[in-house]
Image: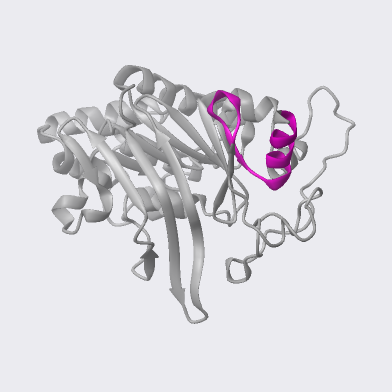
Amino acid sequence: MSEPLISVKDLTIRFRTDEGLVTAVENVTFDINPGEVMGLVGESGSGKSVTAKALMRLNAGNTRYDPKSRIILNLPDGPVDVFSLKRDAELRVVRGGAVSMIFQEPMASFAPAISVGKQMIEQLLIHTDLSKAAARDLSIEMLDRVGIPDAARRFDQYAFEFSGGMRQRAMIAMALSTRPRLLIADEPTTALDVTIQAQVIDLMKDLVSEFGMAILFITHDLGVIAQTADKVAVMYLGRIVEKGTVRQVIRDPQHPYTRGLLSALPKLEDLEAKLTPVPGDIPSPLDRPAGCVFQTRCPVAIPGRCDRDVPDDTNLSGGRSVACHVVADSVKQGMT
């Protein structure tokens, strides 16, 4: 079996604050293979974006990574230890080179005093060997492919002249134009209407097929994940609680949190059915629960155990895993 494109092992991230060290991500492990789309889902505050930014070393200066944390990017020239990169020139491989990112807030990705086209050309000149004329042609082509009308004219405009949805599409075009090996897409379709959303998703699928590009797709929308991803990791308060193929996780969720997320979705076959939200609120990272991080909201938590012991990953058939004491007990009972 070939090596994964990127391998994340025991990723733990803490932020230094006035209140002390806050754990944002804890013992996160996953692999993404070339040409594979992995969905990362969970509520706001689950640590999804912090995890994604760690792959590009973009978290703030007050970030503390656990010494055991490892991120290895396997490229044709050899493996790259992301945490060993120090100088700006070295970091370019994970900042717009082999890895690109579509951020949640498109306005933060564009300098307001520089035209969108000039910014697209600049990053292509840094990360590719294209001439300026070829970079311009490719940039206009990508703007057109993500559905921006009159792309050649829009190319010379500024971000504030674009609508919110158009800025989002321009950001997607800029991220895709370098043909990265890994695209990190953080809520890339949030500001788009359904027709443009479908167009962008189709574009991403085409690029996966055309270039073997892998995607880490971060979203709250399990419907989008069902359309785009090959596998999915469900994240809650900094920990991955369930991993598996999309078919496994969507059709047969095992962790109580995953079941709660799916129960909260409207059902087209029963429009009269009431939505069932996950009870309670996600705790603050400053006040992480002992034991299982989900135990304060879990309908099947085992008193004296779930509130005391951190669950290990239980490996199920088909390569999926679930971090849950109840699931672990069920598997053990099935073996006896």
| Quadrant hosting residue 270 | top right
Q: Position of residue 250 (x, y in %)?
A: 66, 28
Can residue 194 be seen by looking at this rendering? no
| Viewer-nearest residue: 27 or 126 | 27
Outermost residue to the front: 336
Position of 118 with respect to 50 (left or right) is left
Instruction: Tell me the residue at 79%/46% (across/down).
Output: 277
Q: Position of residue 272 (x, y in %)?
A: 90, 31
Residue 321 is one of the magenta-drawn residues: yes
| Viewer-nearest residue: 54 or 197 | 54
Q: Position of residue 60 (x, y in %)?
A: 37, 65
Position of 310 with respect to 177 (left or right) is right
Q: Which residues, given as a range, are shown in magenta?
A: 315-334
Dominant secondary structure, magenta:
helix
Image height check: is 197 above or below 42? Answer: above
Position of 297 with respect to 59 (left or right) is right
Instruction: Tell me the residue at 61%/23% (across/down).
Output: 247
Can residue 132 be seen by looking at this rendering? yes
| Viewer-nearest residue: 69 or 266 | 69
| Quadrant hosting residue 219 | top right
Outermost residue to the right: 272
- Asked which colour scheme the image uses, the reply is one colour
Q: Position of residue 292 (x, y in %)?
A: 66, 56
Instruction: Tell me the residue at 26%/35% (across/down).
Output: 74
Instruction: Tell me the residue at 32%/33% (across/down).
Output: 5
| Viewer-nearest residue: 81 or 122 | 81
Quadrant that contains the C terminus: top right
Residue 323 is one of the magenta-drawn residues: yes
Quadrant that contains the N terminus: top left
